[in-house]
Image: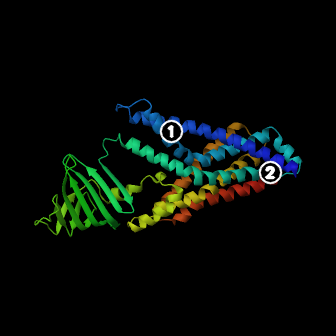
Amino acid sequence: MIKAMLMNKYLGQEFLKVTIKTTLIFFALGFIMNLFEEINFFKDLNVKVYTPIILSLLFTPSLLHDFFPFIILISGILFFLKIKETYELTAINVSGVSNVSVTVIPSILSVLIGVFLITAINPITSILVKKYEIKKGAYEVDQEYLGAITENGIWVREKNMEKNNIIRSSYLKDQNLIDVSIYEFDQNNDFIRRIEAKTADISSLKWNLKGVKIINSEGIVSSNTKENITFISMYDIDKIKDLYSNLDTISFWDLNREIKLLKQRGYSTKQMKAKMHRSFAFTFFLLSMLLLSSFFTLGTAFNESNTTYAFLTIISSIVIFFFNDFSAVLGETEKLPVEVSVWMPILIIFIFSFIGIIHANQK
């Protein structure tokens, strides 16, 4: 009993050491890659030298979260390769412990890491991504509009050379905004007038407002109010629907609330539901990658070179990445249900890896 506990403790510590080292390497690589992008973005702007560095530090943790399944894959290969090449695995097998049992502790740790990343780290990375977008957005001179979905409705702010507008709508129905209020301001932010409309067709940048009422700066309803008018905006239906383009800003704990909010505002919840399923599946994804790494190492002969393992890792990462991406596209285009598009790749990897582990145990 004590011998088994000591062995499990050793295996757990060694796996965590390898995982931490691999994570730090990926963090450094992600930071450097993103830093080059930030430097390129700010090359024509007069900013302080540490601005790109701060932005990279804010963004890299989110990038690292996306990398983590492959971090587990590489960490697992390095860990199993270590105990295999040093003949520790042989000693473990001689003591009566099978190859399947050797994978139990790393598998449990992978599950715990997944739960920790989703429940504790994800809320932090979502906050960092929000700060990243706010800080970087301040330097995007071409961004003349801003939108948000809140409990009070859909809000849009846009500015141009003549005036600034703040637009509010209760919800979106098909390609129409319902119960629209448009507040117009001049360049000095002095209020000009308010346009009320029952509906606004936003299929193009030229909105068609119906059921219109115009109120001037003194609160008087204009006598020239027309039933239908045209309003030129910087938003159309595509941009309105794209307000949630970066789902990394949404914390795991806020997903359910955001889905309810999108339903109330007439938005599609497909992408948000897909993110929720990906969050639930994340732990199983890490587990499947750990099992896959054990198949590559414990299920192969001792005379395989490190180059072979590196090749297998790279090829597997590429195949899994594109397989996941292809499945996600099928879900977004409604060729597959969202649940199937998220869980299918993980289930296939899991089954393939588990069969490989059974094969390795029989060797």
Residue occupying the point 77% across, 56% down: 358
Is residue 204 among what the camera can see? yes
For label 1, the SS is: helix
Percent across and percent down for residue 92 are 85, 46
How crowded is the residue under tag 1: few (<14 C-alpha within 10 Å), some, or many (20+)? many
Figure coloring: rainbow
Examine the rendering and report whether any part of residue 330 can be seen. no
Q: Which residue is drawn at 72% across and 57% down?
A: 354
Q: Are marks 1 and 2 in contact (CB under 8 Å)?
A: no
Mark whose residue sits in front, 1 or 2: 1
Q: Which residue lies furthest to the left in this view?
A: 223
Image side of residue 44 versus residue 316, left or right? left
| Residue type indicated by callout 2 | Asn
| Mark sitting on residue 99 | 2
| Classed neighbour count for the residue bearing mark 2: other residues with Cα under 10 Å, few (<14), some (14–19), many (≥20) | many
Residue in view at x 52 percent, y 37 percent: 31
User: Mark 1 or mark 2: which comes first in sequence?
Assistant: 1
Mark drawn on residue 57: 1
Q: What element carries label 2?
A: helix
- Viewer-proximal residue among 149 and 64: 149
Q: Is residue 285 above or below residue 212?
A: above
The residue under label 1 is which amino acid type? Leu
Q: Position of residue 38 (x, y in %)?
A: 43, 36
Snapshot quadrant of residue 217 = bottom left
Going by the picture, which residue comes out furthest to the front? 218
Q: How far apart are marks 1 and 2 (CA)?
A: 40 Å
In the visual, does 282 lie left or right of 126? right
The mark found on residue 225 in the picture is none
Q: Nearer the viewer, residue 237 or 143?
A: 143
Q: Which of 300 and 337 is in front in this view?
A: 337
